[in-house]
Image (cartoon, coloured by chain):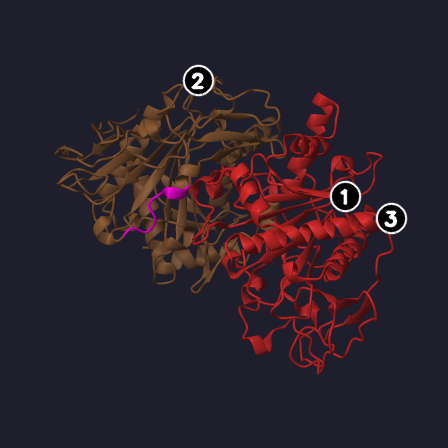
Chain colours: A red, B brown
Amino acid sequence: MNRTVPQPVRANLADGREILFFSSGVPTVPGVDYRDLPHRAADSPTRLRFDRQIGDWVIVAPARQQRTYHPPREMCPLCPDPDGRSSEIPAADYEVAVIENRFPALSTARVGSGFGLPQVPGFETEAMGYGRCEVVCFTSDHDGSFGALTPTRARLVLDVWAQRTADLLARDGIAEVYCFENRGEEIGVTLAHPHGQIYGYPRRTRRTATMLARAAEHRNSKGGSLFEDIVAHELRSGERIVARTEHATAFVPFAARWPAEVHVYPNRHVHNLTELTDREADDLASVYLRVLRGYDALYGSPLPYIASWHQYRSGTDGSVDGEQEGYLHAELFSIRRSADKLKYLAGSESGRDAFVTDQLPEDVARDLRAVMA
Amino acid sequence: MNRTVPQPVRANLADGREILFFSSGVPTVPGVDYRDLPHRAADSPTRLRFDRQIGDWVIVAPARQQRTYHPPREMCPLCPDPDGRSSEIPAADYEVAVIENRFPALSTARVGSGFGLPQVPGFETEAMGYGRCEVVCFTSDHDGSFGALTPTRARLVLDVWAQRTADLLARDGIAEVYCFENRGEEIGVTLAHPHGQIYGYPRRTRRTATMLARAAEHRNSKGGSLFEDIVAHELRSGERIVARTEHATAFVPFAARWPAEVHVYPNRHVHNLTELTDREADDLASVYLRVLRGYDALYGSPLPYIASWHQYRSGTDGSVDGEQEGYLHAELFSIRRSADKLKYLAGSESGRDAFVTDQLPEDVARDLRAVMA
């Protein structure tokens, strides 16, 4: 890593799951989780099923039907709980806490005979749902939001993502690490306490595979980096740029699919968060914060959004199958298309992957620039 | 065509758009549309933009922000209007009516210099939003639903889709014809009157391209038809079959992505609805109706769903680039994952195309069989 990243204080919850506490100052002292939870080894396993029509894996996780659903505030599982009796986080307070998801789509708990996926899937090909699902609590403030974090805290979260990325990518059987945040009930969030998630997938996701294939094609035909060329083009054009600093650039993409879609890139081509220098990480965190604050200013109310980080392995020697073309960036987007209307993925999008957007990207960039500090 | 398909009575609306009336008996007599609408040539044009990251086109249609949004019942634009003053359908009554969409994502109205898409897209590559968007009204009954149609009417709708498919595929510049229905406010439907839509796309959609590529791969490696093999496998296995008749089969796919996902195939491999015989069309319509009725019986309330028809060109000589592998079928799915919860496409699905399902497909098939007549 190009900078020092805080290492966590580790503890275990009552059912054996890991909890990690990160702090920028005095380390958090974990309490004891006294809850009477069945050991996680009793979890129903999840599985991957191969879809022959699309050539991709679907995660089947029936136990997630039972996951916590809009609990009352006093039963918030992500608030700090000094007594260790009611929440997932047995501590008097915390800065950033990471927990293995209690209702995981993917888990390392049952490795069994291995985590490899069949190379030549046939009919009814299943594999164990190996992987890792983590919940990242950005703040102990139940009523906070990522956009309301201080720059120091936002930077700490970036470093937590970097630490988790390095940790998970180093494990056998993890092919891709995905840090993301879903924010807002409108987008299906069932816990009000501000939090994000990390998925360690056992195979490259379809979207990542598509993007890397496009980048390889671009390299072959044009001789350059697709993502460097995209950023350079947006800078030349300028009309969709919403923020530009010494080390980071944010823009509405030319062919945005989603309302308020913004992509945030570090100015230097790195593969993932661990490769950033201190100053780059500070700058990226600050531009990211500005975009999120702009989001909430757009309609004068919290904007539901998905923030999706794209990261790749660091290898530049071709040993990681095309990932050297990958360029760290965040893609943020909303499902709110106007002050009082949502964008739904209906027939064209869900049935055909053919997106129809109601907004001209240049107009979105103009509206965002007008409200961004 | 292998059967006689009703031909429409054609008329024009006040702004120049086409309206087509289909009937199984006495032809509908169109009235006059007296509304004071600006001529459609004044529509803001829509455009396609090429997304270099994904290698696909996005439809940008800002005028759709103004589309009709939950009008009060007495202003329903899809109810018959004998006076021709308030709705889109100037007629005393109708069986099935097809209208060019007033707020189209794609339109044939402005052909301009041509409808070809650039073969080698660069940065900021745009094309005109050429194509066709139609609204299909299944019934004049505002409170009806597709599932409540008589078998005769459902069959008429299938024939209307066939007629529209043949008509649109015969036009230059239309690459794919997509018949679908979005049902339910939860899925974003903004007009309560039961209706479906047809999109004539100027290029093959990403999902169709993916499926045809998979089928070509299967042909090369296994020597058979992917889709025939999938249906045959489901019949052998049996545990996900929800309906089977002389000419049609319905099953929950092995790697279902969506709640209540059901695929309905005719038993004979045809490419599109125009190739069905009379008996096949009757049988397919009746199985389709049974699935929709099962949907509404699942939780005792109208299930929000998307019904998505997959059709291909008829050519079997290879002249239509892989489409000879295509197999007509409907894919139906919901966003309701339990009686009181919706499935949202959040971080993993929207950010990575990686689907997580909460339901085991075999359980879904069992639940559907239990409520299907």
Callout 1: SS? loop
Q: Which residue is mark 2?
A: B114
Name which residue type carries label 2: Gly
Q: Position of residue B316 (x, y in %)?
A: 45, 20
Q: Amino acid at mark 3?
A: Asn
Q: Earlier in the sequence, mark 3 or mark 1?
A: 3
Read off the residue under disc 1: A247
Residue A320 image-quadrant placement:
top right
Chain ID at mark 1: A
Question: Mark 1: few, some, or many residues within 10 Å (few <14, many ≥20)?
Answer: some
- The numbered disc on residue A2 is 3
**Which class describes the residues within 10 Å of circle 2: few (<14), some (14-19), or many (20+)?**
few
Q: In the rendered view, does B320 fall on the left or right side of A103?
A: left
- Report whether residue A19 is seen: yes
> Taking B335 as reference, is A198 left or right?
right
Numbered disc in front, either 1 or 2: 1
| Along the line of sight, the residue nearer the viewer: A208 or B33 | B33
Q: Whole-percent x and y of residue B19?
A: 24, 32
**Foreground of the two, B99 or A229:** A229
Q: Distance of mark 3 from mark 2, alpha carbons?
A: 53 Å
Q: Chain of mark 3?
A: A
Q: Which of B46/A271 is in front? A: B46
The span shown in magenta is B65-71
Q: Nearer the viewer, mark 3 or mark 1?
A: 1
Q: Secondary structure at mark 2?
A: loop
Q: State the image coordinates of residue B255 (x, y, percent, origin top left).
A: 55, 48
Q: Is residue B255 above or below residue A189?
A: above
**Does B68 lie within the magenta span?**
yes
How far is the residue under mark 1 from the one under mark 2?
43 Å
Q: Amino acid at mark 1?
A: His
Labels 3 and 2 positioned on one and the same chain: no
